[in-house]
Amino acid sequence: MADRVAACTACHGSQGRAGNDGYYPRIAGKPADYLYHQLLNFRDGRRQYAPMTWLLQTLPDDYLRDIATHFANQHPPYEMGPAPHLPPAVRQRGEQLVRQGDPGRGTPACIACHGSDLAGISPAIPGLLGLPRDYILAQLGAWQGRTRATPEPDCMAKVIAGVPPEDVAAVAAWLSAQPVPDDYRPREAPDTVLPLACHGVPQPVASPKEAP
Amino acid sequence: MTASRMSRSGAGRWVRRGASIVLVLLLLLLVAGYWLGTDDDELVPATTSDFSDPTLIQRGAYLALAGNCLTCHTARGGQDYAGGRAVPTPFGTLYGSNITPDEATGIGSWTSDDFWRALHNGKSKNGDLLYPAFPYPNYTNVTRADADALYAYLRSIPPVSRENTPNTLRFPYNQRFSLAYWRALYFRPGVHRDDPGQDAALNRGAYLVNGLTHCAACHTPRNGLGATRSNATLAGGTIPMLDWYAPPLSSNRPHGLGDWTPEQIASLLKTGISERGTASGPMAEVVFQSLQYLSDEDVGAIASYLKTLPESPEQAVAASQAERMQGAAGMLGQGQNIYEAQCIDCHGAKGEGRHPAYPRLAGNLSVMSPDAVNAIQAVLNGGFPPGTAGNPQPYGMPPFRQTLSDSDVAAVVTFIRASWGNDAAAVSPADVRRYRTIR
């Protein structure tokens, strides 16, 4: 399979461990359904990056599933640079948003869906550590600008819609500054209750009555 | 004095008379042209009245695949047949229309006669002339029975309410009546007739190639008004706006299908790969969306028909190898170094490839073509052959846009175009730069 997907690793690095710059994220070890959904999103125009769409446009769903599974099963070591220095206010605000969200605004915490250790939850919610700041910023910005989307219900679009740019920047800065723990892999947590519904995510959703 | 004045006024009268005659002739020509360009064939009656017959619908579904209707009539990520895909042309952009059975925005109000007229005469239900980006110059060959099956199928799919996207053509091409004159010059309705001297497979192949599969839309070069050139049928050419070269399907050697066996042609059409080359660019899409679903008999019929096409006139290429390689001094060495570092593992020391994983480059139509665009696109953007039942997990070519400069790409493409018996012209870094943006 590694030979078949040489077109992927040319940018995303050997085994999908990430490219040499901030633009090509690590795909290795991400949950299989998450990767599969992203391949569909690129192929079908819900994510915008012409070179990705170009590569995928004549590939059938079954093969995209095989490709996703292949990279989900790769676990090369993380290669992280030294943690960047963050101004204390940014660090504090970033961590607050990640762990508690902004209840006043109705923004849920990142950990509410991505897991208390941010490692992601099988089969469809990705981990958030080990990604470059530029990449996280670009994705959150793309969701706000509607150039990244999932089929409905698009939970991330709702989560990020009203978040001001300084908060988006703080979240991206804090997440990208965290070390990646040794056994960093998506967790099996079928009973996790999500604060809102997400396309393609099997975990149950809190009913509106229970939600704060 | 008097005589001269008289003769001047006499001359004036003759000029006026001449001008009126020219004007009348011009007017007659305009009327005749309009009449010729809007004249319909006699209506062929419907072959059935039961359009909900499941067998007919199933046959229509197959024919819709053969005609690759889905590709132009569906936007990326959009609902099937609801329209919206942009079709860029040198005259502006057209958008595939909604052909679902929605009453208001699709073709739900169309009768089978309306549908036949669209396919056969190139006219919409309301009589509007259709732009030939809808390939009715080919679809006119489709029989009424097949049109009826297609109609039955399109009535059976879910209706989708989606207003058509207005075309954005430039003046004068946005004036629909002007199509009458285009049609007077380049279009006559007509149904395919079997050649009684040929066997059934060849007739079937001819019917498909010249009708539903509309190969000519890409493989026949077009003139300045966008009409396929009648003296160069399936002779190959660069597809306007798409930046891909469609090779000749005629029996030319080595630039056409002359050296291909019918089995190799059928393999490419059905699976996307063959011992002689791989479907890439728009052809990969055609195989993915359309041809892979055809029966072995139909694919075989297309292949055997294509093998009967005569040679077409070769496109002008520089006469001597020296001329072809002009300006390429130093490029071959640079290209060979890049080839040995980046390409040789898959494509081999002699460009022999490794079928079925990696295509051969020696004798590859897309490598040797007069326009080097396919090879440049492949190196810059990589790509997967289409994933098909016959090749469900294709090997992908990595993109080299990040790692190779324009000069490197030009060198390696020049090298593969001039090696292992390939004999095509050098390309320049400027040629490469044009294709850095994916359209």
Image (cartoon, grey):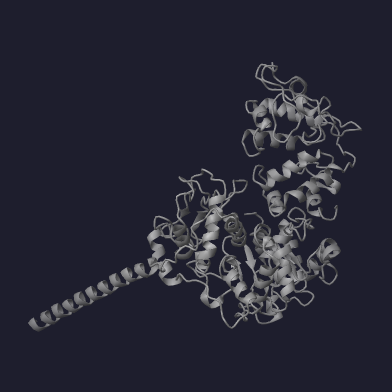
Can residue B220 be seen here? The reply is no
Q: Name the spot of residue B126 as percent of width and height, x first.
A: 39, 55
Q: How many marks?
A: 0
Q: Nearer the viewer, residue B153 or A44?
A: B153
Q: Name the spot of residue B379 as percent of width and height, x first.
A: 74, 60
- State the residue at coordinates (85%, 55%): A3
Q: Name the spot of residue B22 as percent of width and height, x first.
A: 26, 75
Can residue B104 be seen here? The reply is yes
B364 shown above or below B78: below
Q: Outermost residue, right direction?
A: A182
Q: Nearer the viewer, residue A171 or B291?
A: B291
Q: Name the spot of residue B7 as percent of width and height, x first.
A: 13, 82
B132 shown above or below A130: below
B373 shown above or below B58: below
Looking at the image, residue B138 sits to the left or right of residue B297; the answer is left
- State the residue at coordinates (66%, 28%): A160
Q: Nearer the viewer, residue B3 or A124?
A: A124
Looking at the image, residue B167 sits to the left or right of residue B338; the answer is left
Q: Outermost residue, left direction?
A: B2
Give residue B60's quadrant in the image. Answer: bottom right
Quadrant location, the N terminus of chain B: bottom left
Quadrant location, the C terminus of chain B: bottom right
Give residue A140's quadrant in the image. Answer: top right
